[in-house]
Image (cartoon, rainbow, N blue to C red):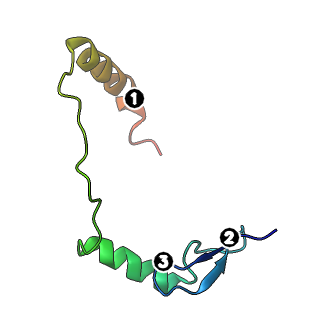
Amino acid sequence: MTLEVNCPTCQNKVVWNESAEYRPFCSKRCQLIDLGEWSFENHKISSPMKVDAEISADMIEDIEAMLAANEQDFFKE
């Protein structure tokens, strides 16, 4: 059974498998067109992001500890 999807840009059929390099797009061209649409803000996430109103001191300390632990490895790769 093969899964086929429509290319989000041109609506051509795309077989969804490992050999489809640009899936869900049919080509690099369609992939870049879509990226351009996002960069010009023609596509947007419609619902606002929800942020927890309460951030505890414990959470801040945990985040700072994680950042401090990873700071040395940040530029190694």
Label whose residue precedes the other's in the sequence (3 or 1): 3
Q: Indicate the position of residue 51 as horizontal and vertical percent values.
A: 23, 35
Distance between the Cα atoms at labels 2 and 3?
A: 13 Å
The amino acid marked with disc number 1 is Asn
Q: Give the image quarter of residue 23.
A: bottom right
Q: Which residue is mark 3?
A: 8
Q: Residue at horizontal 25%, vertical 40%?
A: 50
Q: Is residue 73 left or right of residue 59?
A: right
The secondary structure type at the circle numbered 2 is: loop
Q: Residue 58 placed where, x, y %? A: 26, 12
- Mark drawn on residue 16: 2
Residue 38: x and y in percent read 31, 71
Q: Nearer the viewer, mark 3 or mark 1?
A: 3
**Local crowd at mark 1 within 10 Å, few (<14), some, or many (≥20)?**
few
- Crowding near the residue tagged with mark 3, few <14, some 14–19, many ≥20 C-alpha atoms within 10 Å: some
Name which residue type carries label 3: Pro
Find residue 64 and report its image quarter. top left
Left-right relation of 12 to 61: right
Q: Amino acid at mark 2?
A: Trp
In the orientation shown, which residue stands out farthest toward the top?
A: 58
| Pick the front one: 5 or 26 | 5
Q: Helix or strand or loop: what does disc 3 sit on?
A: loop
Q: Secondary structure at mark 1?
A: helix
Q: Which residue is mark 1?
A: 70
Q: Indicate which disc, 2 or 1, sits on the residue closer to the N terminus.
A: 2
Asked if labels 1 and 2 touch by Cβ distance under 8 angstroms, the answer is no
